[in-house]
Image (cartoon, grey):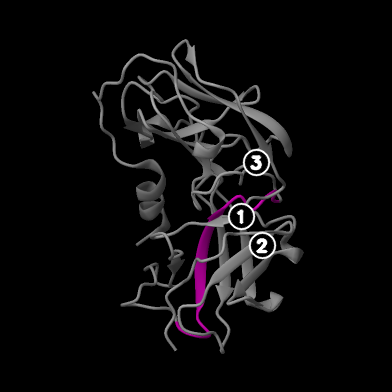
Amino acid sequence: MPPGIWLAAALIGSFAAGQSASRQAPSYSAASVVNAASNQSGAAAPNTFLTIYGQNLAWTTRGLTGDDIVDDQLPTVLPGTGVRVWVGSQAANIYYVSPQQINILVPANLKPGKREISVQVDSTYGPAIEVTLGNAAPALFQMDATTAIAVHADGSIATQDSPARPGEIVALYATGLGATTPASVYGKIPRAAAPLNDGETFEVRFDGKPVDRSSIFYVGVAPGFAGLYQVNVRLPDDVGANPEIRISASGVASPAGVRIPVRR
């Protein structure tokens, strides 16, 4: 399955209009603002996907479509929704809205530090929630609560029925890995590779053991997808079955307990 298909399924959802919601102010909390890949709160950085859970977040349900993107520029409001999400004074790019959930991309041009996130629906605002943007907030995109997406060279996803093998090169997909060269442009879909600035300290660990740096062939922007990072890594010859995988960027590790399907 190509990365675009699962990314759309994981982050965008299908279009559905006409759902109603009571016209009350949006309601959410710091605990309900989470990293969209890990679903954990308190993990945010510039150019990171976040999910906001709550009530009265929109009057309808709508996902981003190709018609909403003009000249590779992502919208900050999906037409017909009236929903904007502010990160400080800047509007985030929006991928999906519903009465209970919003998916956004934190503006890539923001600097690390404290910011307030607030949801605006037409002229009504929810509470301003303080978040701290770090240099990185790494998290792997997952098929389920414990399984990271790992893609074979033929574009198919590694599963228990089609596992990765020791020595194989797989592609991993993540958000929140930090700054790249060239830099990501606010709201713009990248069309070329851009390696991570802090790539020399980037780590991939299987069952706690770091992979040799020479086995990480690329870490940086995934061309064609704003906010998405790609890691091409060779699995160690001695990797165990279904190992736990963690990545680290700028000294921050992704959450524990995530594995990839591997069979020796």
Q: Residue at x 34, y 77 (%)?
A: 162
Instruction: Choose mark 3 or mark 1, whichever is in front.
Output: 1
Type of the residue with mark 2: Ser
Quarter of the image where the C terminus is located = bottom left
Question: In the rendered structure, which segment of residues is drawn in magenta?
Answer: 165-180
Labels 3 & 2 near each other (Cβ < 8 A): no
Q: Which residue is mark 2?
A: 248
- Distance between the Cα atoms at labels 3 and 1? 11 Å
Image quadrant in which you'd find residue 218: bottom right
User: Residue 187 or 240: which is nearer the viewer?
Assistant: 240
User: Residue 64 or 255: which is nearer the viewer?
Assistant: 255
Image quadrant in which you'd find residue 153: bottom left
Labels 2 & 1 near each other (Cβ < 8 A): yes
State the image coordinates of residue 169 (x, y, percent, origin top left): 52, 76
Quarter of the image where the N terminus is located = bottom left
Type of the residue with mark 1: Pro
Quick one: SS at disc 3?
loop
Q: Which residue is mark 3?
A: 46
